[in-house]
Image: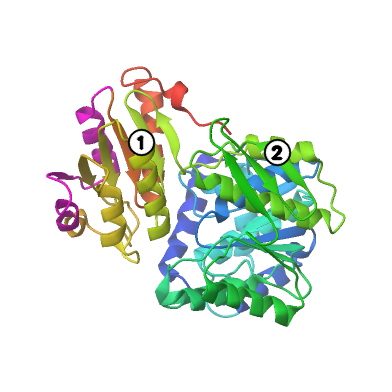
């Protein structure tokens, strides 16, 4: 039987590794994996990088591969509520006991130099568990960038680069082209790449890396495309070898059709390598894909929507959604933003369609104080409140929201994660008092 105290101690030890910060490079992760017998070489992989949409694409592709009959692993970050979210097999988070055993196996290894970071340990744990449980395929999402990201030790069958916008400039570079060059670092010799990158300077970097590696590039708009049928709520994918009419995605938001299009192109690229993926698996996998924290409805009365919107492109997409889909509703914004983000521009996009803002901060050290955000919000809104914690912000939002109001939680995946924790506690403590949790509970 699992010792809960030991498990909680294990989590505390892992999270304490965050004190080592972010250190890009492959020497430490390679040392760890070599000591473990290179588990990453015991299954086939698809490697996914990009600024936005990479989690949605990775999740959708893993779901399709599972419906195609393969035992499938999925590694993503960050988690929203539980660490186990990062490592999934056949659509299920790994068990607590397996988290402990994977972590303990790493503790026995002398790192050979500097201490491993939190993300390096997570990556090694995922590869170890995928190998131990005998997955056929693993879909691996990069943490930051690509070239020096800890996940870039895999030899994938396919690379996917979703899109590029400015992010993590301190680590990846100050221009779209420099960031694209870092993300294109996941392209390996002879391994095809599917991409939604559209900026000329960024696309040149992807094509240059592919040319050097002798890799085929499948580009959105040139090799494959999609067309929406808004009345039916479906879209048609037109690809290199296949047309898929009447597709649906289980994820909300118009931009999810683009992510699903990239996923379909990935399936075609794998089919060209002889991987059996039936049409039905594509339809079913897209329709049943669920990815938490992206336009996710977590409460019904009042309606509460959580969306990470943790960079400028994502915030603008959410702002457009709020303006078009929630135009007839009074919006209460709950927001907190990290210190490495362009918070003034992100907050502007989120405040414009809102009626009130409640500013807060997540528990992570990099979270900006709400007092820093307040002057920006007041440029757009008369009603601005501050809350020291996400839980207190949610209390304020729910108490002030009318039956037809909408609470939108955005600006950071960490804020979204703490908001979901809040509703998890509310479910067990006050089920039925503030609304119908089960009606808004996400599937999957």
Q: Is residue 88 above or below residue 182?
A: above
The crowding category of the residue bearing disc 2, from other C-alpha atoms within 10 Å (few below 14, some 14 to 19, many at least 20), is: some
Which numbered mark, 2 or 1, is in the foreground of this view?
2
Residue 17 lies left or right of residue 380; in this view the side is right
Question: Residue 128: x, y in percent?
Answer: 70, 58
Q: CA distance from mark 2 to mark 1?
A: 40 Å
User: Which residue ends up furthest to the top in the rendered image?
Assistant: 432
Residue farthest to the left, as pictured: 382
For disc 1, the marked residue is: 422
Mark 2 secondary-structure assignment: strand
User: Which of the 4 quarters of the picture holds residue 69?
Assistant: top right
Residue 402 falls within the magenta-colored stretch: yes
Left or right: 335 with respect to 380?
Answer: right
Q: Which residues are magenta?
A: 374-403
Q: Earlier in the sequence, mark 2 or mark 1?
A: 2
Q: From what the image shows, is residue 392 above or below residue 130?
A: above
Disc 1: CA contacts within 10 A as few (<14), some (14-19) or many (>=20)? some
Give the structural element (helix, strand or loop) at label 1. helix
Where residue 34 appears, x then y in whole percent?
Answer: 72, 72
Give how far across and how far down residue 424 sits, in percent.
41, 32
Between 362 and 171, the residue placed more toward the observer is 171
From the viewer's side, name the closer residue of 28 and 186.
Answer: 186
The disc placed on residue 179 is none
Q: Which residue is mark 2?
A: 245
- Examine the rendering and report whether any part of residue 52 can be seen: yes
Residue 146 quadrant: bottom right
Residue shown at 46% from the left, 43% from the top: 293
The reply to whether the magenta stretch includes residue 154 is no
Spot occupied by residue 372 in the image (x, y as percentages of width and height) = 19, 60
């Amino acid at each position: 039987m699992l010792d809960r105290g030991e498990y909680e101690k294990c989590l505390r030890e892992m999270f304490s590794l965050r004190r080592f910060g972010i250190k890009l490079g492959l020497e430490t992760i390679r040392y760890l994996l070599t000591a473990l017998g290179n588990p990453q070489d015991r299954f086939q992989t698809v490697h996914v990088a990009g600024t936005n949409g990479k989690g949605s694409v990775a999740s959708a592709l893993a779901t399709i591969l599972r419906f195609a009959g393969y035992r499938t692993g999925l590694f993503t970050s960050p988690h929203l509520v539980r660490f186990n979210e990062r490592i999934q097999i056949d659509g299920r988070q790994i068990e607590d006991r397996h988290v402990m055993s994977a972590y303990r196996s790493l503790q026995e290894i002398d790192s050979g130099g500097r201490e491993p970071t939190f993300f390096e340990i997570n990556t090694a744990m995922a590869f170890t568990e995928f190998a131990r449980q005998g997955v056929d395929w693993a879909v691996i999402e990069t943490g930051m960038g690509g070239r020096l990201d800890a996940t870039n030790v895999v030899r994938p069958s396919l690379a996917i680069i979703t899109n590029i916008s400015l992010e993590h400039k301190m680590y990846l570079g100050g221009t779209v082209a420099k960031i694209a060059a870092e993300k294109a670092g996941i392209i390996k010799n002879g391994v095809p790449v599917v991409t939604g990158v559209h900026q000329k300077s960024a696309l040149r970097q992807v094509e240059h890396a592919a040319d050097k590696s002798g890799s085929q590039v499948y580009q959105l708009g040139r090799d494959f495309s999609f067309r929406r049928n808004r009345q039916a709520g479906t879209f048609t994918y037109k690809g290199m070898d296949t047309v898929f009419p009447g597709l649906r995605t289980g994820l909300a938001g118009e931009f999810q059709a683009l992510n699903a299009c990239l996923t379909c192109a990935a399936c075609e690229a794998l089919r060209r390598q002889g991987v059996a993926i039936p049409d039905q698996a594509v339809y079913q996998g897209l329709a049943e894909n669920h990815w938490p924290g992206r336009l996710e409805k977590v409460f019904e009365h009042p309606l509460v929507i959580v969306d990470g919107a943790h960079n400028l492109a994502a915030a603008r997409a959410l702002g457009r959604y709020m303006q078009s889909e929630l135009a007839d509703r009074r919006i209460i914004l709950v927001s907190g933003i990290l210190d490495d983000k362009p918070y003034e521009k992100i907050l502007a996009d989120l405040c414009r369609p809102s009626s009130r803002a409640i500013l807060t901060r997540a528990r992570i050290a990099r979270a900006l104080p709400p007092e820093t955000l307040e002057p920006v919000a007041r440029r757009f809104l008369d009603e601005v409140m501050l809350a020291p914690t996400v839980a207190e912000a949610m209390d304020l939002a729910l108490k002030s929201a009318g039956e037809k109001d909408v609470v939108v939680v955005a600006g950071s995946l960490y804020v979204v994660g703490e908001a979901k924790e809040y509703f998890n506690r509310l479910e067990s403590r006050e089920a039925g008092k503030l609304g119908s949790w089960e009606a808004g509970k996400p599937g999957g």
